[in-house]
Structures are given as C-alpha cells and as structure tokens.
Image (cartoon, rainbow, N blue to C red):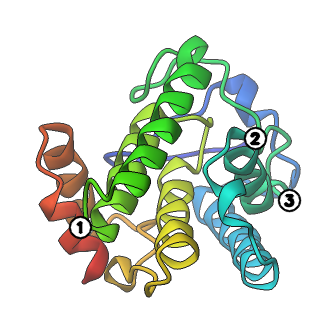
Amino acid sequence: MGLDLKYEDGQTPLSEEEKEGLLIKSITTHGELDEHEQLNIEEAINWIIKTKIKKDKILTEDFIKTLHKKMLGNVWSWAGEFRKSEKNIGVKWTSIGIKLRELLNDTNYWIENETYPPDEIAIRLKHRLVNIHCFPNGNGRHSRIMADIIIESIFDKKIFSWNQSNMVKADETRKEYIRSIREGDKGDITHLIKFARN
C-alpha cells in the first residue's frame, strides 16, 4: 500500500527514497506516522532527562546528530544522518555541515560574550537550526528540543512551553508558530521568543 502523506503548511515533503527509510512498514497514514514519531520523541526526552549532558558536548555536530537519532531512530533508518536531497526549506544539502558549524560557533560566541539574553540565544539557535534543515524530517521538533536543552543545561532556566503544543496538528497554534518562524526569517525574533514562552 505504501506511505500516503498529506503535508500541512510549513512541513517538508519526504522524497520517495527517504520514505523507503521507514522502519515500521505497517504505517500507512500521516496520523500513524505522527503517533509513532511522538512515542519515539518521548523516549528521547526520557534519555535527555536521565543523561547528564555535559555543557561542552551540546553545541557539537555529534550531539545534534545523536539527538535526532534518539528522537526518530525507531521510525526512520536515516535518523541522525544529514539529508542528501534538496527541500522546500533549508540550505543546499551539500552545505549543511558548514552552516551548522557556523551556527554552533556563533552560539558559543553569544554565550561567552552574553551577546543576547539566554532565551534569545536559545531561540536564535533554534531558528537558524530549523532554517539549515539538517535532516529529511523532524527539524522543527529537533530544533525546539535543542532550544530546551540549551536553556536548561547551559543557562539553568526553565524549558520553553511552546504553547503546550508539539505543533504536529494544523491548528491555530501551528499557524502562529509558522508565522513566528517567518517573522524570524525577516530578522524579527521577538514573536518566536514570545511564542516559545507562552
């Protein structure tokens, strides 16, 4: 039967080759896929809670990939590997490594020099990370969890509430999230910071 996916505004379509990476062959609908991915993400959250992540390990390519693998590795064979295809969002797939390194270096600089308040540093990283779009799928969720890890593990502050939503359903909350991301694309990150703390 195959995997029949319907994409909402702001979601990145998977290539046929990427769809072949589905590990649970009984999944045929987007709803079933969301359910399995959410269960896997909950396991990743438990791993984060149990693992005392060293501050100096968080802002590394290795950790970015490990987190994605923990989040989606039960569902997708390519979890934790950078995408190898062009998408409707993101940098050229061949420059992911370079753009990610630039972002991690910038974030380290912001932290060391207190360039921005803690919330803004975490959200600036989140925004640029989702715009790099390292992976075939799960980039929004991955970048939100990264922001939570930074705010909690590096700044010792409460994680973001993200409007009490995982933004999977195409509702008003997701629309506001996408609007906030697009405001950030234009250089105004304030809406996204406010959204994250609501």
User: Dot 2, how many residues are within 10 Å of its Cα: few (below 14), some (14-19), or many (20+)?
Assistant: few
Label 3 belongs to which residue? 74
Q: Is residue 40 left or right of residue 195?
A: right
Circles 2 and 1, Cβ within 8 Å, touching? The answer is no
Q: Does residue 156 appear left or right of residue 193 in this picture? A: right
Q: Is mark 1 on a helix, strand or loop?
A: helix
Separation of disc 2 and disc 3 at Cα? 18 Å
Of callouts 3 and 1, the N-terminal one:
3
Name the secondary structure under disc 3. Answer: loop
Q: What x and y, as percent, mark residue 73? A: 83, 54
Q: Distance between the residues labelled 2 and 1?
A: 39 Å
In the displayed structure image, the side of residue 24 where residue 189 appears, left or right = left
Dots 3 and 1: beta carbons under 8 Å?
no
- Helix or strand or loop: what does disc 2 sit on? loop
Question: Where residue 9 appears, x then y in whole percent?
Answer: 31, 47
Q: Where is residue 15 in the image (x, y as percent from the top left)?
A: 63, 26
Disc ID at residue 33: none
Callout in the foreground (2, 1): 1
Amino acid marked by disc 1: Ile
Q: Mark 1 points at which residue?
A: 193
Q: Mark 3: which amino acid?
A: Asn
Mark earlier in primary sequence (2, 1): 2
Q: As displayed, is residue 66 above or below residue 94?
A: below
Which quadrant does the N terminus fall into?
A: top right
**Picture residue at 47% right of the left edge, 53% below the top:** 140
Which residue is at 26% across, 67% downward? 117
| x and y percentages locating residue 134 in the rendered image | 58, 34
Residue at 41% of width from left, 68% of height from top?
167
Image disc number at residue 2: 2
When asked about the image quadrant of residue 38, the answer is bottom right
Q: Nearer the viewer, mark 2 or mark 3?
A: 3
Height in image: 3 above or below 166?
above
